[in-house]
Image (cartoon, helix red, strand yellow):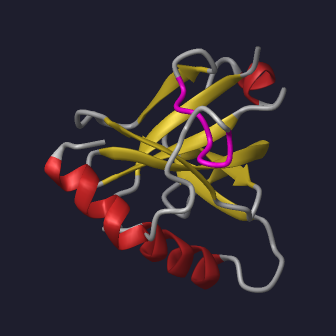
Amino acid sequence: MSLNLIKLCVGADTIEDLEAWRAKIAPGDKPMYHVTRMSPKRGDELLDGGSLYWVIKRVIQVRQRIIGLEEVTGSDGISRCCIWLDRELIRTAPRPKKPFQGWRYLTSADAPPDLSSPASGGEDLPDDLRAKLIEMGAW
């Protein structure tokens, strides 16, 4: 069973905002990355099929497969962790999540299913309708 990370997608109101950010920082077919202050201690488990689950507007909505972890040093001399991510954004069944700082580990058992899985339902819903159902608390 793989281990995952969960992180707030600060500055994004929609999955489309995340897609625009992805296109800006990793144009073409380059892998996407996210730099965070703390390095995961359980990196080997994350690299064994783990994903980064993004929380957008207090709802887990999408994930990206983690393809690498790299220690980097910023211009300020502080060591950070670069999380390399697959370009594909995989929509998940929406799941509310309270705010938190930084990132947290998320087991596969606790992770929401992908929308493409039979258990999730709603994969054919238009994004705006899905967003309204989430906003109303009906999902």
Q: Nearer the viewer, residue 95 or 125?
A: 125
Which residue is depicted at the point 48% across and 58% down? 76
Magenta range: 111-117
Q: Locate residue 88: give its quadrant.
A: bottom right
- Residue 118 position within the rendered picture, expressed as x and y whole percent measured from the top left: 66, 37
- Residue 71 position within the rendered picture, expressed as x and y whole percent measured from the top left: 71, 43
- The quadrant of the rendering that contains the C terminus is top left
Q: Nearer the viewer, residue 37 or 85?
A: 85
Which residue is depicted at the point 79% across and 85% down? 28
Q: Locate residue 51: give its quadrant.
A: top right
User: How many numbered marks have been drawn onto this rendered protein structure?
Assistant: 0
Residue 110 in view (yes/no):
yes
In the displayed orientation, state which residue is furthest to the left: 136
Q: Is residue 112 inside the magenta stretch?
A: yes
Q: Locate residue 2: give its quadrant.
A: top right
- Residue 80 position within the rendered picture, expressed as x and y whole percent measured from the top left: 58, 44
Which residue is depicted at the point 33% across and 66% down? 129
91 to the left or right of 6: right
Relative vertical location of residue 7 with respect to residue 25 in this rendering, above or below: above
Which residue is depicted at the point 72% across and 54% down? 85
- Magenta: main secondary structure equals loop
Relative vertical location of residue 43 with respect to residue 20 in this rendering, above or below: above
Residue 71 in view (yes/no):
no
Q: Is residue 50 inside the magenta stretch?
A: no
Q: Nearer the viewer, residue 5 or 79?
A: 5
- Residue 27 position within the rendered picture, expressed as x and y whole percent measured from the top left: 72, 85
- The quadrant of the rendering that contains the N terminus is top right
